[in-house]
Image (cartoon, rainbow, N blue to C red):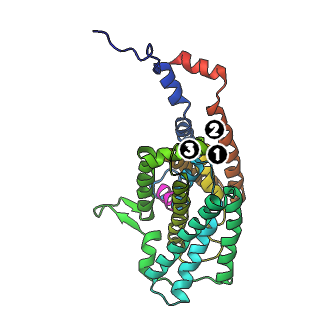
Amino acid sequence: MTTANPTANGGPTISDRVQGILLRQETILFFILIGGVFLMSFQSDVFLTPENLLNQGRLAAEIALIALPMTLIIITGGIDLSVGSIVGLTAIMIGVAWHNWGLPLEVAIFVGLVIATACGAFNAFFIIRVGLPPLITTLATLALFRGLAEGIAQARSVRGYPDWFYILGQKDFEFFGTATVFPNQLFLVVIGIIGIGAALAWTPFGRSLYAIGNNETGARFSGLPVARNKYIIYTLSGFMSGVAGWVFVSRVSTTRSDMGNGFELTAITAVVVGGTSIFGGSGTIIGTVLGLILIQLMKNGLALSGAKGDSTTIVVGLVLIGAVLLNTFIANPPERVRRLVSRRS
């Protein structure tokens, strides 16, 4: 009896598998993250303390909630620039519905989430039914939703929420009465990572998103529900931005129309740094999580070393450029790199 030889049958060799693993952006990003943490730990004694790391998780929660559906959108070759404005509009609507309209705060939160979801569906309608490019559509709604937030707020903020409202954004969960704590909003992030990650990796819906990103016309002619699935991901993006707005208000104790300003840049950077191609067709939720962790810890390390706030924005922009270049390199590595990896394997 003979043993099947995958190489003889045209299957991947060990060299091919090793090359594939080493040239994955998630693998490269993981080693960059380890190296970055090692270097930044020398800049400040506070950096690697549990209190600081948990606080960074709390601060990154809103971006994480936005970046998860953003991954799905970018995989299809689209983009959503309006997410930060939806965060601000949601925050304002929660405050106005509770403070000005006299609704119970629970109902006001629901109103804010419904409006955020409707904003995502509004984007989807113009992208899918009208046929406008996602970049142009969401650039326009970025201004539209932010203008609505500013017009409704009239430069006023809402404060004085009841104590239970701050449990989500400011309190920690204690494990069995021990000193081990976990920021409450990170439970929402973990649920999002598991749910969206599983849907992307293990369901026909997730596989269809990759097909759309690689060749939308081909996916449509193959019978895939392209329009329906794009409606789902843009509407989900609006809903998750609304959840991020709710968490943000709970964390900072007030509502302002400028909430979420610049969130879209950080979220897109985290997604692209995590290996999702800006041209569509590839990407993972795990990569997005690694990218977000790297960016947040980098910003924290710069702050602890005394860098000003403007410098972190510059660094995020440079990281985004570097991530696009790295994506291009991984997609088409030079022949000498291929030979080197093959020789070592």
Q: Is residue 129 above or below residue 145?
A: above
C-alpha span from label 2 to label 3: 29 Å
Image point (50%, 72%), residue name: 113
Q: Residue at x 48, y 77 (%)?
A: 109
Marked residue nearer the N-terminal end (2 or 3):
3
10 Å crowding of disc 3: few (<14), some (14-19), many (20+): few
Whichever of callouts 2 and 1 sits on the residue coming sooner in the sequence is: 1
- Whether 163 is drawn above or below 203: the answer is below
Q: Nearer the viewer, residue 75 or 275?
A: 75
Residue 278 circle label: 1
> Could you classify mark 1 by the number of other residues whose Cα lies within 10 Å: few (under 14), some (14-19), or many (20 or more)?
many
Q: Which residue is mark 3?
A: 221
Asked if marks 2 and 1 touch (Cβ < 8 Å), the reply is yes
Q: Amino acid at mark 3?
A: Phe
Residue 44 vs residue 322, the one in the foreground: 322
Q: Badge 2 is on which residue?
A: 327
Kind of residue indicated by mark 1: Ile
Give the quarter of the image for residue 281: top right
Question: What's the distance in space between the residues labelled 2 and 1, CA to CA?
Answer: 9 Å
Residue 121 picture location, percent across and down: 56, 66
Mark 3 or 1 closer to N-term? 3
204 shown above or below 245 = above
Q: Position of residue 91 (x, y in %)?
A: 56, 75
Asked if residue 227 can be seen in this view, the reply is: yes
* Residue 81 x %, y %: 65, 60
What residue sits 67% from the left and 42% below the top? 324
Q: Which residues are magenta?
A: 52-58
Residue 89 x %, y %: 60, 74
